Amino acid sequence: MEITEKKFGLYFSLLLGVGVALFLTYDIIITNILSAYYCNTSPNPKTKIEKKVEYPISIYWEDNVYPGFSKQDRELMITNYLDGVHLKTMALNGDDGKIYVYNREISQIKYQTYTDKITQLSQQIKRMREIQKDRQDKQYIRNINKLYRDRGTLQAKRTKLINSSPVSEKIYTKATMPKTNYTVTFNEIHLNAFVRKFLYSDETKVIERTTNKVIAYNRRYMRFFYTLLPDVALGNIYYYPHTMCGDDKLYYDGKGFGYIGFYASRKHKIGLNNFLYKKNT
């Protein structure tokens, strides 16, 4: 009788241990099984760039996840993207259902003059750093610091030229808005009710309007925080900030456009991860 009770206690302890282990890890197991499946289904690869465009000139951004751009978001987009050189016309779907079209024209001659001089100074700095062996030499320090100051001054003037140029705003419906050279869409991938408990997915497409061809896209799958590894450091975010597949840094840009500085900028005042947390919790 004593042996039976010991065995019962041992079996009960083992079953309890297995039960606790499964309770703590079931989401890890299911998440990784689902990720393996979805990351190997179409589209493959999850991120693809067929063409880069340095001067898109006009773009329509359609965000259906937030959805749309608020007034503050639109102001941020103007600051980060509408430089009047690479991008002169920008259309955005507003959070009120309207389409906002912004246009900025700047002096191309002045812009190019500043850009050429900045490039020349950058090349001089690069050559000096490659040639100069003694970086502690006082004359070298004076010379290179002057080059950095001169370049900074020109960069500030170029930025002022952009920011001081007027921006026009016109409001349309989607049916009446003017055509743009490119469209960038951002949509949530609707997973079934079970999968949504473990994964979140969205997709960016960059579409060339003249050919109606998708020249870049990115679909990413994000997991939620595990029971064993909850979010104790960041707070107020919906999903774990690294992808299961797809590119976590291209969730809204793609790299379909290659001009420097602009297509790494924020689009919304509230980050997507924080926005979805507020929306879904």
Image (cartoon, rainbow, N blue to C red):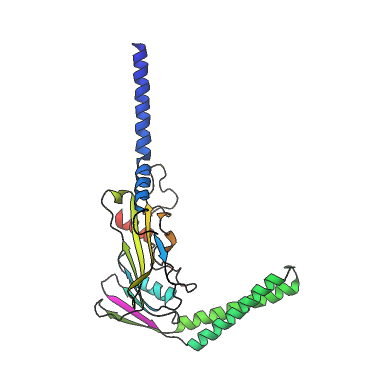
- Residue 248's spot in the image, x, y percent? 42, 59
In the image, residue 92 lies in the stretch drawn in magenta: no
Q: Give the residue drawn at x 46%, y 76%.
A: 54
Residue 68 quadrant: bottom left
Relative vertical location of residue 228 with respect to residue 257 in this rendering, above or below:
above
Q: Give the residue drawn at x 35%, y 29%.
A: 16
Q: Which residue is farthest top?
A: 1
Q: Count how many numbered circles sit on residues in the image.
A: 0
- Residue 98's spot in the image, x, y percent? 27, 75
Apparent side of residue 89 relative to residue 128 in the rendered image (left or right) = left
Apparent side of residue 108 relative to residue 22 in the rendered image (left or right) = right
The answer to which of 34 and 19 lies nearer the viewer is 34
Quarter holding the N terminus?
A: top left
- Residue 4's spot in the image, x, y percent? 34, 14
Apparent side of residue 274 relative to residue 98 in the rendered image (left or right) = right
In the image, residue 98 lies in the stretch drawn in magenta: yes
- Residue 40's spot in the image, x, y percent? 37, 53
Residue 229 quadrant: top left
Relative vertical location of residue 248 with respect to residue 134 in this rendering, above or below:
above
Residues in magenta? 94-107
